[in-house]
Image: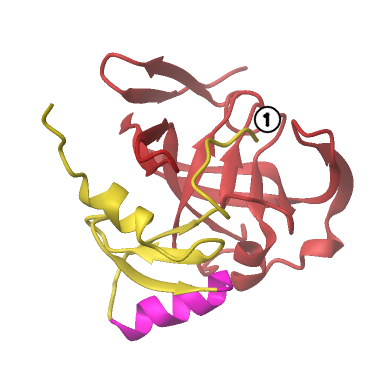
Amino acid sequence: MLLLIDPRVEALRNAPLNSWIALSEDESTVIASGATYEEVVRESERVGSVDPIILKTPREWSPISL
Amino acid sequence: MKLPYKKYPTVAGGVDLRAICPVYIALTARGAVRSKKIEAVIDSGASNCIFHAQIGEAVGFDIKAGRQEETYGVDGKSSAIYFHDILIYMPGGQITIDGAFSYDMPVPAILGMRGFFDNFKVTFDPTGQLCEVERIYQA
């Protein structure tokens, strides 16, 4: 079976859990992570990212029911 | 607008798909600072649009000054949410809604019935693995 590696999925799989993270504009790389939204915004600005996408990682990658 | 489902890893090594809309939020005041782009889960099971309070505070909302209500998750637990007029920027335009903030969110944002599904026709397409969202205007 051919398994295609998705850069976004791999980036998320390797990201710190239970954290805020910023992904690069192409969503292939975690460019910042931290305990708070503001921490991640500051760090993403420090590395020069113009338009990152911010999300929260869970305690573990289980399916969610909100 | 067509929004391809976003992929998330699972503990079992697989992939989970979610309908996600990238949004920015801001106060409704002219010239207000926008948030960074955040991933909002499109969730027809949610009564309201709810954003993480940390994002609101970062762009100037006085969160606890808003109208307080209780909301219940699928686990039956209640938590306080605080309503404000929120300007949302999304692909295709912008909209002001009566949305809420919560300090107790596992995701940055959810887009629910009031504020999102009453302003957009939403079609989930499992074959194309995308969600199509079209603005509607009701009298």
User: On the image, which quarter does residue B71 sit in?
Assistant: top right
Estimate the x, y position of residue B81 in percent, counting from the top left.
80, 49
Estimate the x, y position of residue B101 in percent, counting from the top left.
72, 53
Residue for point 41% across, 81% down: A43
Q: Which chain is red?
A: B
Identify the residue under disc 1: B46
Per the rendering, the colour in which chain A appears is yellow
Residue for point 36% across, 23% down: B132
What span is colored magenta in the figure? A35-47
> Is residue B108 shown above or below A20?
above
* Nearest to the observer: residue B119 or residue B139: B119
Residue for point 65% across, 35% down: A66
What amino acid does circle 1 point to? Ala
In the displayed structure image, the side of residue B125 where residue A41 appears, left or right: right
Estimate the x, y position of residue B90 in percent, counting from the top left.
42, 44
Q: Residue B30 lies in magenta, yes or no? A: no
Estimate the x, y position of residue A53 in percent, counting from the top left.
38, 58
Residue for point 62% across, 61% down: B27
Q: Residue A37 lies in magenta, yes or no? A: yes
In the displayed structure image, the side of residue B37 where residue A11 appears, left or right: left
In the displayed structure image, the side of residue B104 where residue A16 appears, left or right: left
Label 1: state its secondary structure. Answer: loop
Q: Is residue B35 visible?
A: no
* Nearest to the observer: residue B37 or residue B31: B37
> Is residue A37 shown above or below B21?
below
Q: Is residue B59 visible?
A: yes
